[in-house]
Amino acid sequence: MNAPTSNSGTDFVRELLKQDSIDGPYGGRVQTRFPPEPNGYLHIGHAKSICLNFGAADEFGGTTMLRFDDTNPETEDEHFVEAIQADVRWLGFEPEEVRYASDYFEQLHAWAVQLIEAGLAYVDDQDAETISQNRGGFTTPGVESPWRQRSVEENLDLFARMTAGEFAEGSRVLRAKIDMRHENMQMRDPVMYRIRDQHHFRTGGRWKVYPTYDWAHGQSDAIEGVTHSICTLEFDSHRPLYDWYLEQLGQGADRPRQTEFARLNLTHTVLSKRKLLQLVHEGHVDGWDDPRMPTLQGLRRRGYPAEAIRAFAGHIGVAKVNGVHEIELLESFVRTHHNTHALRRMVVLDPIEVVITNWPEGLDDTREAINNPEDEAAGTRAVPFSGRLFIERDDFMLDPPNKFFRLAPGREVRLRAGYFITCNDVETGPDGEVIRVLCTYDPETAGGQAPDGRKVKATIHWVSADHAVDLDVALYGRLFTDPHPGSDGTDPLESLNPDSREMRGAKAEPAIVDIAPGEVVQFERLGYFARDLDGGDLFHRTVGLRDEWANIQKRQQS
């Protein structure tokens, strides 16, 4: 299998950590952090950041904190905290500590008062829309607030009253006093605190004002002793503000250093939290863990192994420019992993009955099948064989075209791990559809070899009808038909695929009952399928057997 391999080289982030660990201000220490907001579920894009933060720190003998940015009480919940921790650990990483921005609310508030006392922050009575309009644009300066010159005493009084809950939401904010003409829009008197009369899942009703991400972020890094704050590129313009806050608070040369990298984008995939929320709320998917979703919980349910996701993240590396990776590349890593590790089972998705007319009456037979040809230690299994079988409808044609080598009238094929069979006749229904194929078998070909050395051109899988186990199987296509949904300015959901899931009833060999919830097996000749995490008879198709990534590479090279 032409599978991609994970890069083992370096990148600019690791080069920075290497240099700083040698002659930087941190005394050889490396500490990173992963700071999700607990208002949703992690997706494949977060996985890249997790792998980078945890992986890079570990390579330099460092540590990584998991810190929840719980500064928006109206959207956050303990359920998301638990889900995120479970996802990080499922991905294979253990944080040094679990912290919350809310752990530092007292200190952040005290530091805000310190900036007010230094004349570097003020209370603004303008509403959010006016503040946004008065920030100006990239070619026009901002307009200073009429409240910008309030005295320190008045600002201290108003901020204390904001904190006490005397004012309504949206009536006042605390802003840093920097420069409304600054070329960087983030430096034009950014908001530090806003009034929120909401219940917080950790602090309850204690606080009526909550810090913005930009105010809480760098200061939380400093409190925790983070050395390198590794962010995605959209925070590049925030870095001067990150540094400004730390400088005003007297942080020295060993203060945290922010570095940005390109976020992950995949074809046929939407990673906007807002759009994912819309998919769930409008019922386009069955929930955040729907196997069609790019969430880690959805990918896990579908049968994506954490090892393959980590290998994919390592392979694509760390760049300074945003780009888009083909989803087929990710699938190739998943396929490669399962090809090595997954057991094999025979399952028929669209059954047509085969009757072996010369099968001895009352004969009980079992065939020995290999569990995984890539892993000798996986051994073999006994598969019951009988005179009545199911094969795939696609493996039989009444009037086959050229180059169709599977079963047809007068043609002989091999049954995998079974016998050679020859089609002699068919039975049809009222509409002419073939409902039963009548065959004879050659008992001398047990195990799939003819003693006279004759060859057949096709091997097909089968299931004994007398021993078959019924399954429900979910077959998945792309959730979005457009490789780049929304890239032309339209709503990404306009390219939502209404046929992204097809449900089938299937027939399986008895050994399928031994597959544990969440375990992935190869349905021979069909693809890799994961038993649903909740157990039962439902299996999700993880990926097919065809290496579409290899075909893409061939087209790109031609």
Image: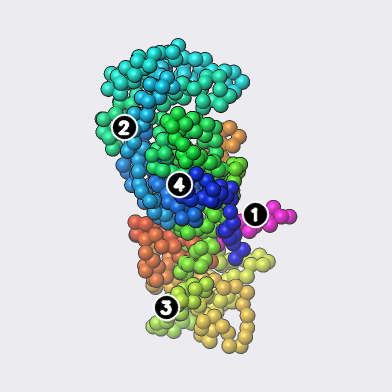
Seen at 41% across and 83% down, the residue is 363
**Magenta range:** 542-558
Mark carried by residue 453: none
Q: Residues within 10 Å of mark 4 (few under 14, many from 20)?
A: many
First reached walking from the N terminus: tag 3 or tag 1: 3
Mark carried by residue 106: 2
Q: Looking at the image, can residue 40 be seen?
A: no
Q: How crowded is mark 1: few (under 14 residues within 10 Å), some or many (20 or more)?
A: few
The residue pinned by badge 4 equals 32
Seen at 58% across and 88% down, the residue is 451
Q: Residue 216, how many percent across, how many down?
A: 40, 33
Mark carried by residue 552: 1
The residue pinned by badge 3 equals 382
Whole-angstrom CA distance, mark 1 to mark 2, is 54 Å
Q: Camera-side residue: 511 or 221?
A: 221
Q: Looking at the image, can residue 27 be seen?
A: yes
Q: Which amino acid does label 3 sit on?
A: Ala
Whole-angstrom CA distance, mark 3 to mark 2, is 66 Å
Q: Residue 257, how many percent across, how many down?
A: 50, 40
How is the protein colored in the picture?
rainbow
Q: Which amino acid does label 2 sit on?
A: Glu
- Is disc 4 placed on a helix, strand or loop? strand
